[in-house]
Amino acid sequence: DAMVIQNPRYQVTQFGKPVTLSCSQTLNHNVMYWYQQKSSQAPKLLFHYYDKDFNNEADTPDNFQSRRPNTSFCFLDIRSPGLGDTAMYLCATSREKKPGQGEKETQYFGPGTRLLVL
Amino acid sequence: AQSVSQHNHHVILSEAASLELGCNYSYGGTVNLFWYVQYPGQHLQLLLKYFSGDPLVKGIKGFEAEFIKSKFSFNLRKPSVQWSDTAEYFCAVIPYTGRRALTFGSGTRLQVQP
């Protein structure tokens, strides 16, 4: 089945120790997103890639970066995790016809990576 | 910036009861609207969506939602809930043009008692 896959599902890291989360998709979608969901809160967009173009949200901390080496894979790098970065990180994908214009397509979500920073 | 309000944070129902979850959004332009569901231990799944046309949309598992443009609302309904509907439900909006970010409501936790 076509799907969005995230690895690992659970990650424990120490304060300040860099961590990388992985997302892959078999949907061949051109847009990939990273959302952060803290406990009992709504998911919040960190950034997204439209094809190879990176789009950062204005309030995403500099500590968070992303890489998209090809259509299928996207990584979330947290350079120096703080305790406040403990959250669920959700990857999503969609197929968009035009950049920023016209009807938005449905975003499909992966199972998430639960990150705990100690 | 757009925002989404879900009025009910926690709803407890008995099986066969009817369900209505409220969702209101604030945004000046055209939006696309979604309801996502997250079953315990599972990922966010699309329940239904509204892009255009008939404001009453039907989704999976007997759910439906009605878009009322004048009220900026997109309420979710189900005539008769089942124990398996126990989950968290998120309303989300995205502007028709511009930013590609989904804005989610804070979610409603539905607990259906057998």
Image (cartoon, helix red, strand yellow):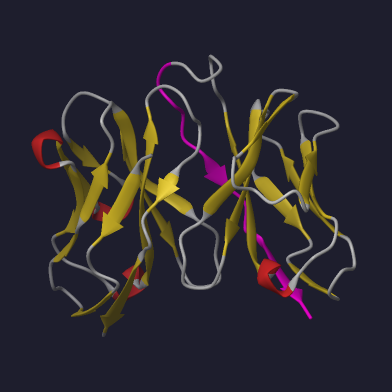
Tally the numbered discs.
Answer: 0
Asked if residue B12 lies in the magenta stretch, the reply is no
State the extent of the magenta-drawn residues as a range. A102-118
Asked if residue A108 lies in the magenta stretch, the reply is yes
Residue B12 seen from this side: yes
Please state if B103 lies on the left or on the right of A25 as rendered: left
Residue A75 seen from this side: no
The quarter of the picture where residue A78 lies is: bottom right
Name the spot of residue A30 as percent of width and height, x first. Answer: 65, 25
Name the spot of residue B32 as percent of width and height, x first. Answer: 33, 32
Name the spot of residue B106 as percent of width and height, x first. Answer: 38, 62
Camera-side residue of B71 and B85: B71
The residue located at (55%, 59%) in the rendering is B43
The residue located at (71%, 50%) in the rendering is A5
The residue located at (79%, 81%) in the rendering is A118
Q: Residue furthest bottom?
A: B114
Camera-side residue of B31 and B36: B31
Please state if B113 lies on the left or on the right of A76 as rendered: left
Q: Residue furthest right?
A: A17
